[in-house]
Image (spheres, rainbow, N blue to C red):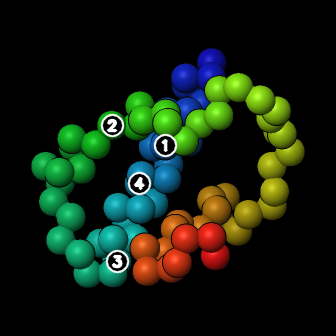
Amino acid sequence: MVLNAVVLFNTRYMDAAVNQLRADGFDVRDEDVARLSPFVRQHINMLGRYSFQLPDLPGGLRPLRDPDAVDGE
């Protein structure tokens, strides 16, 4: 069940990122998108404490990271 949740999370955010790149005018080819994998899991904390209280987010997703922003902001 955890793996399914990770894949769903990654799929939703990868889709949002690709849509944002296309909206910003980047040439994102369908054949490149077809090679993306939602099975990346290094960003998931498999040990430790978890909070399942979801914040009320507009559109259901948290904002995508701004690649021009300095880390830590």
CA gap, disc 2 and disc 3 = 21 Å
x, y percent for residue 11: 45, 43
Q: Quadrant of residue 4?
A: top right
Kind of element beneath mark 3: helix
Of the image marks 3 and 1, the number of the one nearer the N terminus: 1
**What residue would you read off at disc 2?**
37
Callout 2: SS: loop
- In the image shown, does 67 or 28 lie closer to the viewer? 67
In this rendering, the answer to whether 31 lies above or below 41 is: below
Q: Pick out the residue farthest to the top.
A: 1
- Foreground label between 3 and 1: 1
Question: Can residue 8 be seen in the rendering of this structure?
Answer: no
The kind of residue on which mark 1 rests is Asn
CB-based contact (under 8 Å), mark 2 and mark 3:
no
Q: State the SS at label 1.
A: helix
Mark 4: give few (<14), some (14-19) or many (20+) Cα within 10 Å: few
- Quadrant containing the C terminus is bottom right
Q: Which residue is tagged 4?
A: 15
Which residue position is annotated with label 1? 10
